[in-house]
Amino acid sequence: MRLLVVEDDDRAAAYLARGLTESGHIVDRAGDGELGLALALEGIYDALIVDRRLPALDGLTLIRRLRERDTITPILVLSAIGDMADRVEGMRAGSDDYLAKPYAFAELLARLEALARRADRARGSSVLRVGDLEVDIRSRRASRGGKEIPLQHRELLLLVHLMRHAGQVVTRSMLLETAWNYDFEPRGNIIDMHVHRLRQKVDHGFGYALIHTVPGAGYMIREPSGAGITPGTVGRPEP
């Protein structure tokens, strides 16, 4: 998942970001509520972790404003303010879960995974299909024609983004935002290199290519005919 941590305490944010990164997630951090809201409104995050006490804009106001535009992205409030009334207030503001500090990292991770599963159901499915290519986001497994495709973490993130936008052009900048955090400084043609490796795994040895280069624009995943593309659906594509 790509996660946004909105936390003004540098030490607490660093601890959380390190643990989430080591668990295989892409993590961005905002140190105040205004920046947190601006980043959240970009719509690129699978979940948000928000502290209540933030400079510039408090956590609950951030959540209320975000919910005016985004009702699906899961939000977990992480706060030292944790009695019953505070938790109720946080849920009513629009958060999906509330965890009081101090907390066990394993519990936080489990709660995030539960929220992500809920969000998948709200979006329709955790399974994406384009032709005979299938990706189960929840289990992080990909297969084509029934044959499992071993993917590295960033390759999976790139493939999921392409499949969620099946039939549409996905720019290199969009792919960069998907699989690397904002602190990363890209060098050379890193996106092209990763997509090349992805194509070798997804397309090599099969009857036709699914991942296509769009000259001067980026990449697109589709079948040659453009038919049978079913992003975010469980059922098999119509013939």
Image (cartoon, rainbow, N blue to C red):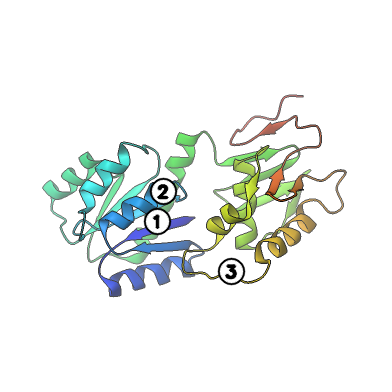
For mark 2, give the secondary structure: helix
Whole-percent x, y for residue 93 in the image: 22, 41
- Name the residue that disc number 1 marks: 110
* Spatial separation of the CA atoms under disc 3 and disc 1: 31 Å
Residue 114 numbered tag: 2
- Give the number of the mark in front: 3 or 1: 3
**Marks 2 and 3, the one that precedes in the sequence:** 2
Looking at the image, residue 117 lies above or below residue 68: below
The amino acid marked with disc number 1 is Ala
Task: Judge whether residue 157 can be spotted in this image.
Answer: no
For mark 3, give the secondary structure: loop
For mark 1, give the secondary structure: helix
Disc 1 + disc 2, Cβ < 8 Å = yes
110 left or right, relative to 63: right
Whole-percent x, y for residue 24 in the image: 51, 64
* Spatial separation of the CA atoms under disc 1 and disc 2: 6 Å
Disc 3 + disc 1, Cβ < 8 Å = no
**Marks 3 and 1, the one that precedes in the sequence:** 1
- Name the residue that disc number 3 marks: 186
